[in-house]
Image (cartoon, grey):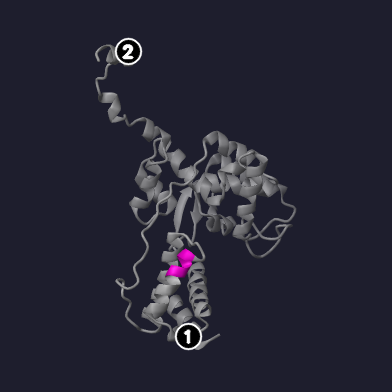
Amino acid sequence: MTHLRQIMLEELERRNYAPGTIRSYIRTVEHFARHFHRPPDQLGPEHIRQYQAAMFRERKLAQNTVSQRLGALRFFYTQVLKQTWSTAETPYPKKVLHLPQVLSQEEVARLIEAAQSPVYRMLLMTLYATGARRAEVAHLKISDIDSQRMVIHIQGGKGRKDRDVMLSPKLLDALREYWRGLRHKPTEWLFPGNRWHTSNQPITTKVLWLACKRAAIRAGLEHKHIHPHTLRHCFATHLLEAGADLRTIQMLLGHRDLEETTIYLHLSSRHLSATASPLDMLQLATPGEAIRSV
């Protein structure tokens, strides 16, 4: 480990950055240095400008990905090298907001029913019933299931924040059936790793990706490009359509800002259909009457 890498790691850990963010930031600085075949402390604003352009032109990265890479470089220069960072010389690309894919409730049911194995089915049900992120589901512990209060404790979510979500009676029944079907009862993790579910480590997030991908193919929904976060979007949108308020959904999703949650207003068919087009307020003649009056 180089001296600069060690300093950056320590600075990130001091600020309690999430492990995934730490890995991403360090990889970015390493890639930046390899791109120019020089140590990163010998590179300056002109190199950053060229690197940013190359990320768009050569690597075809999305705008949001480029912004994350710039965030890593900014941290390195300001917190590790103690240099200034000019936003004028290194502008962040404009954010692009894409509306996420949302399935109907019938499609969600088809997806769950098409699960390849009982464990995959349980993962899909948990994703949809809780609206949790894939890493949050992967790291659920047995002790997080509180059947007395009918809540699930999600610990160490994004931003290292804990929260509680509802425990669906249907999900609880399915979890108990899943538990009875396990030959080796886990002692800590709700979804232990390895094919026999006996590891002392939880499953990886890749398992949740595979559960979604394979179920989508079996359900004839592969054209929808379904992934674990799709079920999180479905959870929020279907709650909104059922009458839940945005503030409640914000708390369940663990969003820091309510603005993040308002995107589901654009996805809710109930809210869209309840809003009349201004065309409906115009007093227009029928097509036949309009032609005769010309």
Gap in Å between the C-alphas at discs 1 and 2? 77 Å
The disc at residue 49 is none
Residue 261 relative to residue 218: left or right: left
The location of residue 87, given as percent across then percent down, is 31, 71
**Callout in the foreground (1, 2):** 2
Q: Nearer the viewer, residue 24 or 149?
A: 24
The location of residue 136, given as percent across then percent down, is 53, 57
Q: Residue at x 46, y 63 (%)?
A: 65
Based on the picture, tell me whether residue 56 belongs to the magenta stretch. Answer: yes
Q: Main secondary structure of the magenta part?
A: helix
Disc on the earlier residue, 1 or 2? 1
Residue 200 relative to residue 11: left or right: right
Disc 2 target residue: 288
Q: Categorize mark 2 by other alpha carbons within 10 Å: few (<14), some (14-19), many (20+).
A: few
Residue segment shown in magenta: 53-57
On the image, which quarter does residue 216 sit in? top right
The disc at residue 4 is 1
The location of residue 109, given as percent across then percent down, is 59, 37
Q: Quadrant of the N terminus?
A: bottom right
Q: Nearer the viewer, residue 294 or 130?
A: 294
Q: Residue at x 36, y 41 (%)?
A: 245
Residue located farthest toward the bottom when viewing the structure as drawn: 3
Q: Can the viewer see residue 15 in this picture?
A: no
Q: Nearer the viewer, residue 101 or 201?
A: 101
What residue type is disc 2 on?
Answer: Gly
Q: Quadrant of the C terminus?
A: top left
The location of residue 76, given as percent across then percent down, is 42, 78
Badge 1 vs badge 2, beta-carbon distance below 8 Å: no
SS class, disc 1:
helix
What residue type is disc 1 on?
Answer: Leu
Where 26 falls versus 180 (above or below)? below
Q: Can the viewer see residue 211 in this picture?
A: yes
